[in-house]
Image (tube, rainbow, N blue to C red):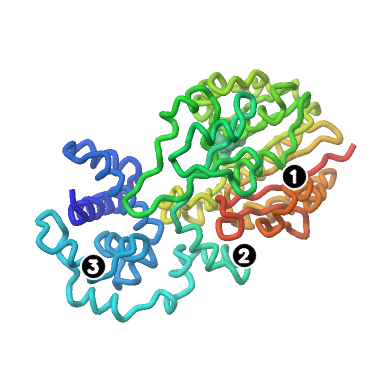
């Protein structure tokens, strides 16, 4: 397929997503099933246009003066693919599978608009109702942070130190563009792809099958490392999900001590069993029944709450979620977060740590949530996060925001990671 056919297909998928409110991955998969002639390269390129259009929905639409699937499809190619209106029309001209060429009105809109003149929320590529939340979180740099959340993400890996080291994995992945990550000591980064490229399928690598590494955003690796799990500790991962943090904690503990991996949803935990086997984590016990948590009360050195959240810090990877999110959902997540914190605190031993993590950038889910918890629980006091950061990641001050009240935030523009929030509170005796 040439660019025109790929763009037409991407517009079709974007229409499907809009019409049927479908997750982007499902819409792309369906398109692939009903167009079996399309090769892997075509599918990757179509997926890239769709994801770029969703990441840049507002800015791409603004360039063409409307936010139709056609406008954001063309706009994505202008913003992310280095195309100009002229080069696009030249590439599409005479291609019978291409969408109609840019019209005179569209060409005029593109020629007359500069993104720098667009309203702030358009440049930040966020819904209007989220703009105040971004401003609250980032102050003067909120537009830059929003825009950074609209860029293509890198592919980050965490080396499993139980089985390998970074040099060994980098050698296995030579030729993929893999490099040591900037902050996480066991992290590897494959930079964002350009144009119609695609990231290597690292999960097909023998090194992955042997458990030498996991796919994990660098921000998630940093948050897990900040929790400070050490060999011999008793740790409860209260919202373990598929186990991303559990596995990182287990490696940090060198398989010694015990991690209890719990989640309210059994189905979410399901992938953890395979991952534990592959990574040779031997100190993880999966706890599905809440009643099995009772003996852990007051006994845990660390209780990790990787809370359900809006996921606003991960919009680079899940851009459709950005446009689906509602105030009502944000309020629902906030209610869950405070209930989970109140339930999880019971397992922390005196002197132990309650660690709260989200992959959201919204203060309402982060600092405000912790402030409200502390109002209800004066016996939990944030540790010195400046000291914690310096001890774990010396020399990386510029990559983090450390709040006055005691917490740590990572974000794409500042840290080059997904957005993450971290707060560790020590339980008084
Ligand atoms: C951010 S995800 C966890 C991601 C996981 N820790 C990782 O690193 O891959 C949040 C998880 O919280 C779980 N959850 C939601 N409500 C819960 C509750 N009341 N108790 C325990 N887990 C809950 C969800 O099922 C979801 O898997």
Q: Residues within 10 Å of mark 3 (few under 14, many from 20)?
A: few
* Residue under pointer 3: 87
Residue projecting furthest to the bottom: 112
Left or right: residue 312 versus residue 354 is: left
Q: Earlier in the sequence, mark 1 or mark 2?
A: 2
Rounded to the nearest angstrom, the CA distance separating label 2 from label 3 is 37 Å
Give the residue displayed 57% in from the left and 54% down from the top: 416
Q: Nearer the viewer, mark 2 or mark 3?
A: 3
Q: Secondary structure at mark 3?
A: helix
- Where residue 141 appears, as percent x and y from the top left, is 59, 68
Residue 352 or 326: which is nearer the viewer? Answer: 352
- Where residue 43 appears, as percent x and y from the top left, is 27, 43
- Where residue 355 appears, as percent x and y from the top left, is 72, 41
Q: Earlier in the sequence, mark 2 or mark 3?
A: 3
Q: Number of callouts in the render?
A: 3
Give the residue displayed 66% in from the left and 41% down from the top: 185
Residue 212 or 27: which is nearer the viewer? Answer: 212
* Residue under pointer 1: 392
- The reply to whether discs 1 and 2 touch (Cβ–Cβ < 8 Å) is no
- The reply to whether discs 1 and 3 touch (Cβ–Cβ < 8 Å) is no
* Residue under pointer 2: 138
Q: Secondary structure at mark 2?
A: helix
- Where residue 388 appears, as percent x and y from the top left, is 78, 47
Residue 17 or 144: which is nearer the viewer? Answer: 144
Quadrant of the frame with the C terminus: top right
Q: Secondary structure at mark 1?
A: helix
Tag on residue 379?
Answer: none
């Amino acid at each position: 397929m040439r660019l025109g056919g790929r763009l037409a297909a991407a517009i079709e998928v974007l229409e499907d997503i809009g019409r049927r409110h479908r997750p982007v991955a499902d819409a792309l998969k369906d398109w692939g099933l009903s167009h079996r002639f399309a090769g892997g390269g075509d599918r990757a390129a179509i997926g890239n246009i769709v994801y770029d259009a969703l990441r840049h929905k507002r800015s791409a639409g603004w360039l063409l003066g409307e936010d139709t699937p056609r406008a954001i499809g063309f706009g994505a190619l202008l913003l992310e693919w280095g195309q100009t209106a002229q080069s696009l029309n030249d590439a599409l001209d005479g291609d019978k599978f291409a969408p109609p060429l840019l019209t005179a009105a569209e060409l005029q809109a593109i020629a007359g608009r500069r993104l720098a003149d667009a309203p702030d929320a358009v440049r930040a590529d966020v819904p209007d109702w989220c703009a105040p939340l971004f401003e609250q979180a980032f102050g003067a740099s909120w537009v830059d942070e929003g825009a950074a959340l609209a860029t293509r993400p890198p592919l980050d890996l965490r080396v499993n130190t139980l089985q390998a080291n970074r040099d060994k994995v980098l050698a296995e992945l030579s030729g993929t563009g893999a490099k040591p990550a900037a902050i996480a000591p066991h992290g590897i980064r494959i930079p964002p792809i350009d144009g119609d490229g695609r990231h290597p399928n690292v999960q097909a690598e023998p090194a992955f099958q042997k458990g030498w590494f996991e796919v994990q955003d660098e921000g998630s690796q940093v948050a897990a490392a900040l929790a400070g799990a050490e060999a011999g500790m008793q740790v409860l991962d209260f919202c373990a999900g598929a186990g991303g943090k559990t596995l990182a904690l287990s490696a940090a503990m060198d398989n010694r001590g015990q991690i209890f991996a719990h989640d309210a949803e059994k189905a979410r935990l399901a992938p953890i069993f395979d991952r534990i086997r592959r990574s040779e984590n031997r100190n993880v016990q999966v706890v599905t029944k809440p009643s099995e948590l009772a003996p852990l009360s007051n006994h845990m050195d660390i209780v990790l709450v990787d809370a359900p959240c809006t996921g606003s810090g991960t919009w680079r990877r899940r851009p459709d979620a950005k446009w689906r999110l509602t105030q009502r959902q944000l309020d629902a997540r906030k209610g869950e977060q405070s209930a989970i914190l109140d339930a999880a605190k019971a397992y922390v031993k005196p002197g132990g740590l309650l660690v709260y993590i989200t992959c959201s950038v919204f203060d309402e889910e982060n600092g405000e949530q912790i402030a409200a918890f502390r109002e209800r629980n004066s016996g939990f006091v944030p540790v010195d996060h400046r000291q914690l950061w310096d001890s774990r990641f010396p020399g990386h001050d510029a990559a983090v925001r450390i709040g006055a009240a005691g917490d740590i935030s990572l974000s794409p523009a500042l840290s080059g990671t997904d957005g993450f929030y971290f707060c560790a509170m020590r339980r008084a005796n």
